[in-house]
Amino acid sequence: MNITPHIRLFEWQMFLKQWSREFIDSASNLDEIPKDVLESGWLGYPGATEAQISQAEARLNIALPPSYRDFLKVSNGWRQMTPFIYRVWSVEQIDWLFARRQPWIESFIRQQFESSNRLHHQNGSCLHHTTVDDSDYFLYGEAQDCRKIRYEYLKTALEISDKGESTIYLLNPNVQTRYGEWEAWFFGDWLPGADRYPSFRDMMEAEYINFLEMRDSSI
């Protein structure tokens, strides 16, 4: 598996330690955080071994993306990342979204189709479902429209966190870079849709910035 120096040199340990300290320092619910976690200043867990990761890959018949593997080796799962995501699964807990959330997938897709149908009928046209064009889909950052997702990808997405405030972290194996990174989704009913990133690392860096902005706005 080819990995760019950009991915290989990322300091997950340092990054997660800083996030842990800042989260704990700003937490209003310290009584809900275990005492040993507060004392250690670490919201993570012991890192996963190569054997644990390989077992999960064999179970799911996949090769996990490099930046996500590197994260797991530093911390096999994570306690609360933001107010919206309560827990990132350990490698033993990850599974396909459809295996756990099929009713949620169907409900979300149905709601979006019904909403689109209402809009099109109001405009005097009929709705014909088509996939999102590449020119609209492969946009990341501020130019991205979170509503323009390919719903069919939900059926093959990998669930890597628990469902928080109607939000979840997903990895999308249908969109991969030449270095083996999978597209990462912060998916939520209320967006509605997903904030998408080229890799798990990109999503975590963006989530950290979102956390800082929410923290600072509440001061």
Image (tube, grey):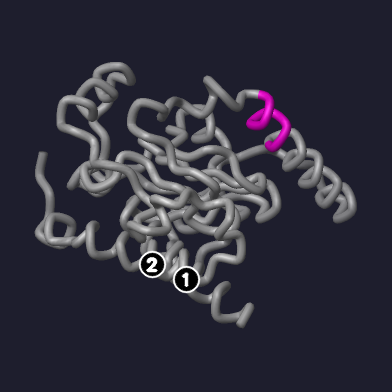
In the figure, 79 relative to 216: above or below? above
Q: Which mark is residue 25?
A: 1
Q: Residues within 10 Å of mark 2 (few under 14, many from 20)?
A: some
Q: Which mark is residue 105?
A: none
What are the residue bounds of the magenta stretch?
103-108
Residue 58: x percent and y percent?
A: 25, 18
Q: x, y percentage for residue 168?
A: 54, 44
The span from disc 2 to disc 1 (Cα, nearest Å) is 6 Å
Q: Residue at x 23, y 20 (%)?
A: 55
* For the residues bearing labels 2 and 1, Cβ distance under 8 angstroms: yes
Where disc 1 sits, the SS reads helix
- In the picture, measured across the screen, residue 128 lies left or right of residue 28, that is right
Three-letter amino acid code of the residue under disc 1: Asp
**Front residue of 141 and 214:** 214
The kind of residue on which mark 2 rests is Arg
- Viewer-proximal residue among 124 and 10: 10
Which image quarter is the C terminus in? Answer: bottom right
> Residue 92 at what x, y percent from top left?
35, 26
> Is residue 105 a member of the stretch shown in magenta?
yes
- Answer with left or right where residue 89 lies relative to residue 91: right
Q: Residue at x 19, y 62 (%)?
A: 11
Asked where in the image residue 1 lies, by quadrant, the reply is top left
Q: Residues within 10 Å of mark 1 (few under 14, many from 20)?
A: few
Helix, strand or loop: magenta stretch: helix
Residue at 44% in and 43% down? 88
Above-or-below relation of 205 to 102: below
Rendered position, 138 above or below 55: below
Secondary structure of the residue carrying numbered label 2: helix
The residue singled out by tag 2 in the image is 21
